[in-house]
Image (cartoon, helix red, strand yellow):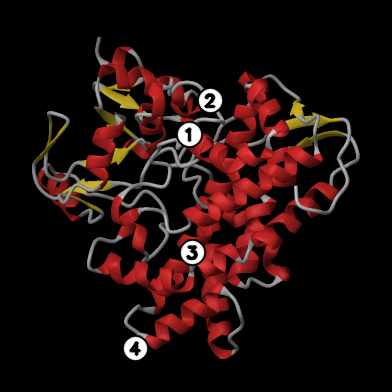
Amino acid sequence: MSPHEQCPHQDGRVVIDAAFKADAPARYARLRELGPIHPAQFHLGLKGWVVVGYDLAREALTHPALLKDATPAAEALAAAGYVLHQPSVGLGAQMMEADPPEHTRLRRLAAAAFTPRRTAELAPRIEQIAHDLIDGLPPAGEVDLVEAFNAPLPATVIAELLGIPERHHLDFRRWSAQALRVASPEHRAALSGLHALLAGLLADKRRSPQDDLLSALVAVRDEEDGRPSEEELVGTALMLVVAGHESTVNLLGNAELGLFQHPDQLRLLRERPELMPGAVEEFLRYDTSVERSTSRYAAEDIELGGVPVPRGSMVVVALGAAGRDAPQAEDADPAVLDVTRPGARHLAFGHGIHYCLGAPLARLEATIALRVLLARVPDLELAVPAHSLEWIGSGIVRGVLSLPVRYRSTGRSGGTA
């Protein structure tokens, strides 16, 4: 049976549209049964290949001929009489869209400012933010967990980390939430708004540096004799905002939904909160918030999984599908959510030189936020049928637009959850 008999299709290609994304784990599972790579059509009709198998995903993410440079794709399309148009406003000059040596230089810029020490020092503040958000909930009732907890927590963390003044926080949160939803009418305005905000703040930090990440980025750039351009500096800051916010919002939402749908696992985590760090790895594997990698382009004719991929072809790795295919310890069933799974293997943060720089912060935020939430709101449950939830319909992220929940009470604030 061909892939298009299992999934929406056009010209023999899997169409990864809103309907596909809403049912992504099941759709990708069917594709994996048919093979590790398939021709696909993405947003705005862009065509390429999607890799769904774990082993081939690791190969594709480190393949020396799969680059971020879209020139081969543009040349291949031009030879066929087409012109490659950018589908939307991008994130600017930053490492996610660069190849070495530019990638190496830009990643060094971000890594020098976004240090493990700076991340680890955030733990007490992340916990306080989580408690403050729960203190702000009604004593009992129903709320949208995305709006009330999942979105404001990482937005507050990254805003404070970057040094964004409080007067800009509302716009910052709104733009951050819209920036990766490429089909939304607000997408372009959100990216433009974030770009202008960060450019202005970077200029302010140069005149009056403070103890924050934007000031650190300026210092690193200036210490390196200005090798990164001003646009690269803004692009790096923008990348940290968008990647650091939206992915964590949906990591929390997908984890919570998974627990609501597996009450035995929810009960286990409430009884044994020390399992949370390992459980976060399982959430990343089971239903990751970054569903697909950013695009790569074949710089030459190559072969992936026995399939010829012509020069100029776009290749995307389905990170979530690869997680469901990753070999696990003790031959455990990868289709099952198991918060006690030892050393859950996944590709949620990518692989190779583009491995997510913010992975430690995402893990820290998720571990603390979920631990506090389950301790403070012990009777939390989904308020609507799971099948009625609306999923983000485009882009590389996966998550629900809202997560209505009900509860009878919130526990006392303070202390370590």
Q: Residue at x 38, y 72 (%)?
A: 232
Mark whose residue sits in front, 2 or 4: 2
Quadrant housing residue 24: top left
**Residue at the spot of label 3:** 238
Mark whose residue sits in front, 3 or 1: 1
Q: Position of residue 398 (x, y in %)?
A: 50, 37
**Residue at the spot of label 1:** 342
Residue lying at the far top in this picture: please name it: 1
Looking at the image, residue 28 sits to the left or right of residue 277; the answer is left
**Residue at the spot of label 4:** 225
Alpha carbon distance from label 3 to label 2: 33 Å
Alpha carbon distance from label 3 to label 1: 35 Å
Q: Are marks 2 and 4 in contact (CB under 8 Å)?
A: no
Q: Position of residue 165 (x, y in %)?
A: 68, 72
For badge 1, the amino acid type reads Pro
**Residue at the spot of label 2:** 337
For badge 3, the amino acid type reads Leu
2 or 4: tag closer to the N-terminus? 4
Q: Residue at x 33, y 55 (%)?
A: 354
Element type where label 4 sits in the image: loop
